[in-house]
Image (cartoon, rainbow, N blue to C red):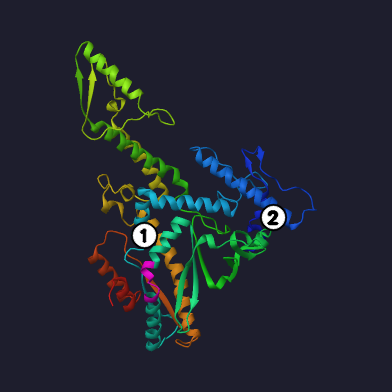
């Protein structure tokens, strides 16, 4: 908590009351009068939220048009997020979820992030704290509880889903359930389940389904899950891509969602053009006299006598592969697509994909699966941007996972399976998969030096190299 937590408080009421476009137009300002009752204020807020969501949808449907952003009291985008209501957040989340279902580039990027951050799974081991002499039997018991938790909750698979949800939805909710056997179980809570009940809609400290201290938005007291209040100690909330005082996260692909759609459309159009060019095998021209013209006119009359279509005759004719066209004398067929070199647009497609890769801080080949212009050994080096990003994500996951694992040990202690002061006696170490191109000999030599100097214990050394 900061020394002045009230200064970090997000004043949702002020942010929601004024919505401007280029600082000119105002949408549904709250009436300045004190005689509005609670139901009338709730009605005004519902109407305003609907209009805000509609405006955002309209701006998204018109290419790269300017969106309407909430303005603070000093004319700045104080909220720092592109939503001001739960309905707008739902729309953003739905749009990004659709990308991860339909867009092949988004799916590839997401799978690669999971593969590098989670990989084959993080390894966890209970070790004694250096400040205390922990009995060996206590360490074994704690490790047994930890292994049971990892196995019961299928933690490697759950780690992958955590990464998926965090990127796709911008946040992850994990709820704790303590069993009578002293084993902790965790389950996901979908973001759309966390919503503010209508009776608390006018209270900013309950906005976005999260109840916080009225003077400090970072002090969470609980969550509204399906309109039921759950204590903050029973849920872990992981957020991404927002500041610490923003209650809800933002999906990873939101800034590049239009790039992903353009890349998909460009690839589709390139394929269609190439398909048309290859469909027509040849054009036969018939050099006949009057008879050829009469046959052509007869064919036209036959076509005009055909059943009419509601919207008029079709303007597009589809050609099957190997189509042969017949043209009479005096009639010429022109194919504009024949002069188009679809390969030229590959450069444009690559430019779009590079923009997406820049947002994800990933090498281009991780997004396109084209390694012809990349060297794996030179890309995944210790000081490379991608390695730094993945290491940062791994550390964030380890810190959040360690909080869950410590809760598992605490639950076992509450049920008598472990000593009550177990967390004071032991610590949990985690080793993520290696990201850099490895030189096992040099790693072993460096670790041997650290071991001899006492900087690494035998258990830590085994954990780093995946040994039992």
Task: List x then y, in percent, for residue 46.
Answer: 65, 52
By secondary structure, the bulk of the magenta-drawn segment is best described as helix
Query: Can you tell which quarter of the image residue 86 is in?
Result: bottom right
Compared with 106, 219 (above or below) is below
The residue that appears at 66% across and 37% down in the rendered structure is 24
Which of labels 2 and 1 is toward the front? 2
Q: Earlier in the sequence, mark 2 or mark 1?
A: 2
Q: Secondary structure at mark 2?
A: helix
Q: Callout 1: few (<14), some (14-19), or many (20+) C-alpha neighbours within 10 Å?
A: some
Q: Which residue is mark 1?
A: 114
Could you tell me how far apart the alpha carbons at marks 2 and 1 are, in whole angstroms?
A: 42 Å
- Asked whether residue 247 appears in the rendered view, the answer is yes
Image quarter (top left, top right, bottom left or bottom right) of the N terminus: bottom right
**Tag on residue 135?**
none
Viewer-closest of 442 and 371: 371
Image-based side of 357 in relation to 334, left or right: right
Compared with 46, 440 (above or below) is below
Q: Which residue is mark 2?
A: 42
Asked if the residue under mark 1 is in contact with the one under mark 2, i.e. CB atoms within 8 Å, the reply is no
Asked if the magenta segment contains residue 382, the reply would be no
Q: Secondary structure at mark 1?
A: helix
Viewer-closest of 218 and 227: 227
Q: Callout 2: few (<14), some (14-19), or many (20+) C-alpha neighbours within 10 Å?
A: some
Image-based side of 50 in relation to 352, left or right: right
Q: Which residues are magenta?
A: 151-157
Viewer-closest of 235 and 467: 235
Task: List x then y, in percent, for residue 229.
Answer: 60, 69
- Asked whether residue 421 appears in the rendered view, the answer is no
The residue that appears at 27% across and 44% down in the rendered structure is 373
The residue that appears at 73% across and 53% down in the rendered structure is 40
């Amino acid at each position: 908590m900061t020394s002045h937590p009230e200064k970090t408080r997000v004043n949702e009421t002020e942010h929601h009351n004024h919505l401007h476009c280029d600082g000119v137009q105002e949408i549904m300002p709250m009436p300045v009068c004190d005689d509005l009752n609670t139901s009338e204020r709730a009605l005004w807020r519902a109407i305003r939220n609907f209009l805000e969501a509609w405006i955002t949808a309209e701006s998204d449907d018109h290419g790269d048009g300017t969106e309407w952003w909430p303005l603070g009291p000093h004319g700045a985008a104080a909220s720092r997020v592109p939503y001001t209501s739960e309905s707008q957040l739902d729309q953003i989340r739905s749009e990004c979820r659709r990308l991860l279902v339909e867009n092949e580039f988004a799916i590839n990027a997401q799978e690669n992030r999971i593969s590098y951050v989670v990989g084959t799974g993080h390894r966890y081991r209970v070790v004694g704290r250096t400040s205390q002499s922990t009995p060996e039997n206590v360490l074994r018991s704690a490790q047994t509880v930890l292994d049971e938790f990892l196995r019961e909750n299928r933690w490697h698979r759950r780690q992958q889903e955590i990464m998926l949800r965090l990127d796709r939805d911008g946040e992850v909710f994990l709820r704790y359930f303590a069993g009578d056997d002293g084993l902790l179980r965790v389950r996901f809570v979908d973001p759309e389940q966390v919503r503010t009940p209508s009776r608390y809609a006018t209270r900013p400290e309950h906005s976005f389904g999260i109840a916080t201290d009225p003077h400090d938005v970072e002090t969470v007291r609980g969550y509204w899950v399906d309109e039921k209040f759950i204590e903050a100690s029973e849920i872990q909330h992981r957020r991404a891509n927002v500041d610490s005082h923003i209650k809800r996260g933002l999906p990873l692909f939101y800034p590049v969602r239009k790039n992903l759609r353009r890349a998909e459309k460009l690839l589709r159009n390139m394929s269609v053009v190439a398909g048309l060019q290859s469909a027509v095998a040849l054009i036969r021209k018939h050099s006949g006299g009057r008879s050829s013209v009469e046959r052509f006119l007869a064919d036209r009359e036959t076509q005009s006598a055909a059943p009419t279509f509601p919207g008029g005759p079709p303007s597009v004719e589809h050609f099957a592969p190997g189509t042969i066209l017949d043209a009479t004398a005096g009639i010429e067929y022109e194919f504009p697509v024949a002069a188009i070199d679809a390969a030229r647009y590959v450069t444009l497609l690559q430019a779009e994909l590079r923009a997406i890769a820049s947002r994800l801080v990933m090498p281009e080949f991780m997004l396109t699966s084209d390694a012809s212009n990349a060297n794996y050994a030179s890309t995944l080096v210790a000081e490379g941007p991608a390695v730094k990003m993945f290491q940062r994500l791994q550390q964030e996951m380890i810190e959040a996972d360690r909080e869950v694992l410590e809760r598992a040990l605490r639950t076992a202690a509450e049920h008598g399976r472990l000593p009550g002061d177990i967390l004071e006696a032991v610590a949990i170490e985690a080793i993520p998969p290696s990201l850099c191109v490895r030189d096992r000999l040099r790693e072993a030599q460096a670790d041997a030096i650290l071991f001899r100097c006492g900087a690494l214990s035998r258990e830590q050394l085994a954990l780093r190299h995946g040994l039992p």
